[in-house]
Amino acid sequence: MKKSFQTAALLAALMILLLLALAGCGNTNTEAAPAVPEAPAVPEAAAEPAPGVKEEEPAVYTVAIREISKRGNVMLDTTFEEMKAHDMEVGDIITVFIGDESYDIPVGNAYTDVDTGNMLCRFDLEDNEVALAVNMGAFAVDAGVGEKQTSEEEPGYRWELRVDEVGLVLKEKKGYLDEYKARNLTRSNEREDYPALTDEEFANFRAVAVTGVQEGRLYRSSTPIEPALGRNEYAMAAMEAAGIRSVINLDDSAQEMRDYETYPGSYYSRCAVINPEMSYDFSSVEFAEKVKDSVLFITENEGPYLVHCKEGKDRTGILCAILECCAGASAEEVERDYMLTYRNFYGVEPGDPSYDILLKNLIRTLDGLFGTDGLEAADLKAEASDYLLSIGLTQEQLDTLKTKLGD
């Protein structure tokens, strides 16, 4: 009997072990690690190079320097097509190698594609030329490419090159394109394309109408003698109608001025004219000297006065702004007068995305000259007066200037 009980107990234990084993197999299935999901495909452009394999870097495009322009632009011996063949075009950011230095700069068409004082690789659309430039500056000086020296021969100076070539390479494709589009403005030189403008507005000719400047005393314009812009005839007619007696020509040398076919026998030729040949480097000693010469010309000659460069935009805009501030104009008046040029050429009005970008050039330039931090809070009359005194004018000459421009 005892043996039978032991046998039964043994069978029961074996049965329990069998059931536990079967239960364990079930638990193993439910606790198995989940399958690893398939990794998403890496976009081809973002794929990492294989270990030990270096990404191919674009080759440096070596270009000879053809010359340095009179305003310090470094003119390169290449074309738009050759630049594009090396994958560099408008809207890109490129690296320029000059000696042991390198500069990352955008590619654009106009100086105003960058802020005042900034470098630009400029594609000159009119002449199919590529230049390294600085908005309101001289690239040759900033990058140490050359030194400007006086000369007894025309035009009175020469550039001495310190390097013969530069290296160019793409840094970021379309890296400046959004900024370029915001700044890039197009215009026509055809009168019929501006039906809403008067002939004077088409020529960017206007009286400077701000506090402290007597009506009909000071005018600004695009060039009345160079025909390239198709506006000179309108500017010439407007200056004659205004009775202009004295002209500050910021663009041409005296010889260049006389060589235009439009000059001999013109109304312009009967005016008193000074040719300061002002540069775009508004922070330079040379610029300060040209401002001083222009102010002295006003004090020594009779108005009405006309200030012009080529477009009547950059150099004319800054010199007129200095004169306006000295006369007592408000920041709002100075800014409005400056921006009228962009309305006349490009139709840019307040509220346009480009308006504030373009206006920054004026504000930063005057802040740099006057040592201010924004125009709105500054005493512009005092700041402009101090600036003119600092560049060598006397208080008596300053008082004469204000009398000539004002009542």
Image (tube, rainbow, N blue to C red):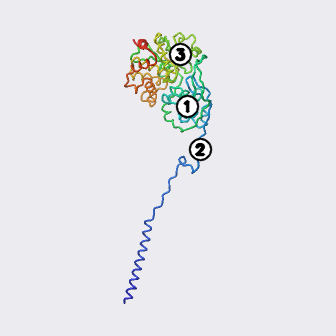
Q: The residue tagged with tag 2: helix, strand or loop?
A: loop
Residue at x 55%, y 16% (from the top left corner):
225
The earlier-in-sequence mark between 2 and 3 is 2
Q: Which residue matches tag 3? A: 275
Residue at x 61%, y 39% (from the top left corner):
59
Tags 2 and 1 touching, CB below 8 Å? no
The C terminus: image quadrant: top left
C-alpha distance separating marks 2 and 3: 52 Å
Crowd rating for badge 1 (residues with CA inside 10 Å; few <14, some 14–19, many 20+): many
Q: Which residue matches tag 2? A: 56
The type of residue carrying mark 1 is Cys
Looking at the picture, tell me which residue is in the foreground, 370 or 258.
370
The type of residue carrying mark 2 is Glu
Residue 213 seen by the camera: yes
The earlier-in-sequence mark between 2 and 1 is 2
Q: Which residue matches tag 1? A: 121
C-alpha distance separating marks 2 and 1: 25 Å
C-alpha distance separating marks 3 and 1: 28 Å
Looking at the picture, tell me which residue is in the foreground, 107 or 219.
107
The N terminus: image quadrant: bottom left
Residue 171 in the image: above or below residue 235: below
Q: The residue tagged with tag 3: helix, strand or loop?
A: loop
- Counting labels gives 3
